[in-house]
Image (tube, grey):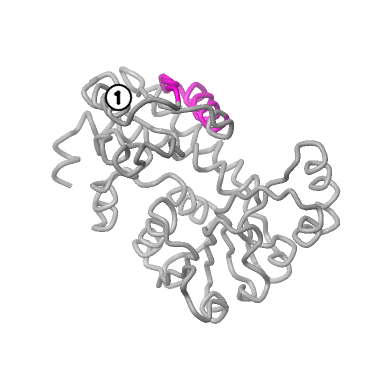
Amino acid sequence: MIKILSGKEIAEAIKHEVAEEVKKMPTPPCLHVIRVGDDQASAVYVSNKIKSACEVGIISHHTHLPATITQVDLLEKIRQLNEDESVDGILVQLPLPSHISEEVVLESIHPEKDVDGFNPINAGRLFQGKQTLPPCTPAGVIEMLKRYGIVIEGKKAVVVGRSNIVGKPMAMMLLQENATVTICHSRTTNLQEITNQADILVAAIGKAGFIRSDHIKEGAVVIDVGINKVTDESLARELFDEDELDKRLKAIREKGFTLVGDVNPKEAKQKAGFFTPVPGGVGLLTVAMLMKNTLRASNLRRKKSAFNKS
């Protein structure tokens, strides 16, 4: 029988652990979030991050900048925060307006304050297996697997997706846990043959319901990192079983959409041994790991020699 890997209890446990550590600190960590423009999804994400920071005792500041801000002015704001000793973590909420280079902006955040884990220096340290601030979503996946007692060492793991934010760091983290890792992507031939060998299958490609039962090995652990909006009721009927369908159709009729991952949940439940739901799975862990990264950044900044020599 399939076991659903809920992210809620694990996220709450991580936040509780962070809160207990923060209580022991002479000065709470400080997280500064920058949002550019008026993207509504970004506003929700930022609100959730600030709320979580408050829950664990982390000081949080939010700077909301207009979509018309120049890249030069945004970089100047980040420079000021880099030099502000009271700030432990800096996060620039993505996406950014098209006239601003996300790559340039993310590279401008000091590695010691890069709580998203996107700076190339942190990516390089992750690649080398050194102490660093890892990207929150793949770090959350590793936490989930460990806390559910799922063995990673010696297992065949397949990551579908090669983004710098999830796919590549996810593969590195699984490799560091001694899994044998394969990365697949849009140009991979015979995808089903490869994914069917996976004891642990991680989907992070941004295509609603793309991974189906014929991609999944019997009894595999299926981790769905995707978050996609489904507006079509006929597609919803393909993705959800009877127990879930009415709720999803109601969401489409009332809100205009329902959320689904990159895995077809109805079909995954027929073959997988473990499965993460969307919503309610990996997404909840991303914010919890952001809190953990902010705490880690604060501690590392207080031990700069350890950060630089590790």
Judged left or right of residue 50, residue 280 is right
Judged left or right of residue 143, residue 303 is left
Q: Give the range drawn in magenta.
A: 44-66
Residue at 45 percent of width and 38 percent of height: 94
The answer to if 55 sits in the magenta stretch is yes
The answer to if 113 sits in the magenta stretch is no
How crowded pointer 1 is (Cα within 10 Å; few <14, some 14-19, many 20+) is rated as: few
Judged left or right of residue 191, residue 178 is left
Q: Is residue 258 above or below residue 211?
A: above
Q: In which quarter of the image is the N terminus?
A: bottom right
Q: Is residue 138 above or below residue 216?
A: above
Judged left or right of residue 115, residue 281 is right
Identified by mark 1, the residue type is Asp
Q: Position of residue 56 (x, y in %)?
A: 48, 25
- Say what secondary structure mark 1 lies in: helix
Q: Position of residue 127 (x, y in %)?
A: 27, 58
Q: Where is residue 292 in the image (x, y as percent from the top left)?
A: 41, 36
Residue at 37 percent of width and 67 percent of height: 178
Residue marked by disc 1: 73
Q: Position of residue 68 (x, y in %)?
A: 42, 26
Front-lying residue, 147 or 73: 73
